[in-house]
Image (cartoon, grey):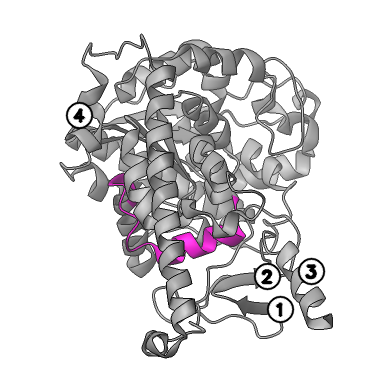
Amino acid sequence: MVTFLLTSRVLDKIALPSHLPAPKIFGGEINLVETQELKILENEVLVSGGRNIHHISPTPHLRTLVQPHQLSARPRSIQASQTEGLRSSSSKIEAAISSERQLLSQDLAGYQTSTGEELDAFLMEKGGNPVRAMVATTWRSGSTFLGDIMSAHPATYYHYEPLLHYDITQARSGARAEDAVRTLKDLMHCNYTSLDTYLQYGKSHQWLFNHNKRLWSHCTAGGSNFRKSYCWKPDFLNRFCPLFPFQSIKTVRLRLNLTKSLVEDSSLNVKVLLLVRDPRGTIQSRKHRDWCPGNPDCEDPARLCADLVSDYHSVKRLAKEFPGRYKVFRYEDFSMNPTNNTIDVFKFFGFSVHQKVLDFLDSHTKSNKGGVSSTFRDSKTAPFKWREKLSMAEVVNIQVKCEEAMKLWGYKILTDADELQTFDPVLNLEHYALEP
């Protein structure tokens, strides 16, 4: 009885994310600090720690408690129960697919695409090619806000932070970059068959799925134990994902040079929007997150601005090589007129705005509500909060390390401490034209 009660308490905490460090070597065996508490129960990862969306560690290789060769030795009653369970799961999946297809039909009744084509032309399950929209940026640059705007469209299947299991590190080159591109390609093709690590990780870090509201409703359909839901099964996801004509994906861990492999893949037909923010605003915003300190890719302004410089030159080159496939927005410009700029973003991706998107904008851009991760923001003031929060010494430190990046992206240098709270930091407060 004591064992049962202890196990129950552990299971009640399973959804909490871990504070485990990043792997020492990615792409090989994953080494975890031995002093961290890690329990593996029934092929699920149980980890200690509080809610922390971004400070995460890769899912370790799970040991299988029951080996395949042992299955034949199990009692027939257990085998029969497993067979019945598989049939039940298959039945639930069929019902879920049918229900979602009907719901989509209702939500999109009367909806007109920007090209005038029927929605069937964008459905993979009907041989069509969906609109694939990718937002590339870095932590605390406004991507959650833009991602939620795009996911407000009822036709959207939202791939939220698919590289979340990389912890607080950037994919720039080497094995990590190759794995990142491979993961994104699989997701864009709605192919979850080989994404075991991704799926197992999500079971203990539910943010991977719960930003996709259409998907998350199925994860919680059977009650609170979402970890055992059919929503984590590739058999379900491989059929559910293709129902949606608008595939939206956003990542803060992939540098722009790596998107070339995605854009040149004719089977994807993906377009990429690079979202840029004033490094002073980004660094100030990161200070509020307990996952940032101690991680150089996050807390070091020099690394942030080296990425901004690299992304600038990458997008100049890629926009020329792939006309019409890349677009740039500065977060500050977007926030000054979110409605018109949202229409512009959807037009770029090749999809028209739905009324639900406009409703989302109306309710999320006029006042500040919630904490630092909330997307309820006064859009005209949110990008410039750093002027109130940073000291002049902090501003100078960032500017010294970011002078080149700020010049390239059109951010003015502050020289007078008396002007800190009234300073207009953006050159030509409008979309920053980026000619290829």
Disc 2 to disc 3: CB gap under 8 Å: no
Report the residue marked by disc 4.
Answer: 323
Q: Which residues are magenta?
A: 187-206
Report the residue marked by disc 1.
Answer: 37
Mark 2 to mark 4 CA distance (whole Å): 46 Å
Q: Secondary structure at mark 4?
A: loop
Figure check: 129 above or below 81: above
Report the residue marked by disc 3.
Answer: 9
Q: Secondary structure at mark 1?
A: loop
Number of other residues with Cα within 10 Å of mark 1, as a class: few under 14, some 14 to 19, many 20 or more: few
Q: Secondary structure at mark 2?
A: strand
Q: Secondary structure at mark 3?
A: helix
Residue at 36% x, 89% y is 69
Tell me the quarter of the image containing the N terminus.
Answer: bottom right
> Which comes before the other along the chain, label 3 or label 1?
3
Report the residue marked by disc 2.
Answer: 47
Tell me the quarter of the image containing the C terminus.
Answer: top left
